[in-house]
Amino acid sequence: MKQRIIIIAFFTILAAYWLLFSAPAVEWQTDWQQTLKTAVEKKQPVLIDFYTDWCPHCKRLDELTFSDAKVGEYFSKENYALIKINPEKDTEAENKFKVYSYPTLVIFKPDGAELDRMLGFSDPEALIKSLEDLKKGIGTLDDLLGKYKEYPQTDKSFEKITLMFGILDKYIARADYPQALELIHRVVEMDKDNALKQASAAMYQRGYIYYKWKKYQEAVAALLEINKVYPGSEDAEGGYASAAYYSEKIKDPKLTLEILKGFIKNFPNSKNVERFRKRIAELEKQ
């Protein structure tokens, strides 16, 4: 009996090693112009991973998802051409694809047309499911917009607003900031009393969008407005803290000081208070 258990354990370990080392390695290309051209000729789908060196979720994608055997097998089975681009170092790619949030995955059909974009980290199972869904037209921007149009204009349900935030992510991934801001305006109007806590969440996203757009004055104003309109909301404190951070981009120490002091006054029990007091002391010495 003991010998049988040892044999079973041995073959279990052997199988695990076989799966680990027999999985196809994920091979990334960096010459995106040539790879895209070749992929069209070979009728291959393409996935481009836009990353930066400082992005923690980009590193998680590499360490936990792209290194996973199931993901490697999936890419091999579907014959994906895989490209990695750091747009902060490749300005031509940044100008062409307009990717400013990281990580962003851009997926192309075998005919070379862009299929969709995915923002943020996904674990191996979620990534494979998303790619399978996109292949079937599920979860694309067009799909989400079609579902949105099915709702009556008078519908103000949480489900509809959740769908709108999904569409918002698609606009942000494409750097289509005007469309994103228009959608945010609609969410705020739908949940004007913030009963669903979605109006304040949308206003926070408004500040983030202006920041990505490099409109720092508008970003700060949008984030501070949350506390004026919805004081006590979950997003008010986060909005104020982000406004303090974004204000540093404006290079106006007086404005940053004003925001930091306002934060301490409005949120005296926040975990950020001591850190902001230190920053206030630094600015007052300048």
Image: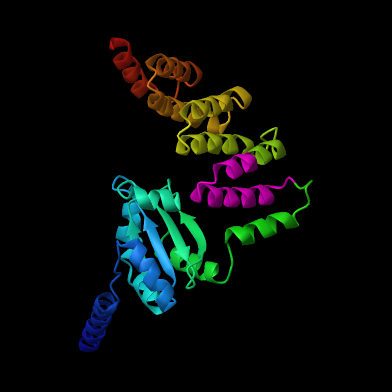
The residue depicted at 60 percent of the width and 44 percent of the height is 179
Task: Say which quadrant the C terminus sits in.
Answer: top left
The residue depicted at 33 percent of the width and 46 percent of the height is 88
Where residue 30 sits, quadrant-wise, is: bottom left
Q: Nearer the viewer, residue 113 or 67?
A: 113
206 lies left or right of 281: right
| 146 to 99, vertically: above or below | below
| 22 to 233, vertically: above or below | below
Task: Give coordinates of residue 241: x percent, y percent.
Answer: 45, 28
137 lies left or right of 119: right
| 36 to 195, vertically: above or below | below
Task: Give coordinates of residue 187: x percent, y percent.
Answer: 66, 41
Task: Give coordinates of residue 19: x percent, y percent.
Answer: 29, 78
Task: Give coordinates of residue 246: x percent, y percent.
Answer: 42, 29
Report the predominant secondary structure element of the magenta stretch: helix
Is residue 57 at least partly visible in the picture? no
Start and end of the magenta stretch? 156-184
49 lies left or right of 212: left
Residue 167 colored magenta? yes
Task: Say which quadrant the N terminus sits in.
Answer: bottom left
Q: Nearer the viewer, residue 122 or 114?
A: 114
| 30 to 15, vertically: above or below | above
Q: Nearer the viewer, residue 274 or 190?
A: 190
The residue depicted at 42 percent of the width and 68 percent of the height is 46
232 lies left or right of 37: right
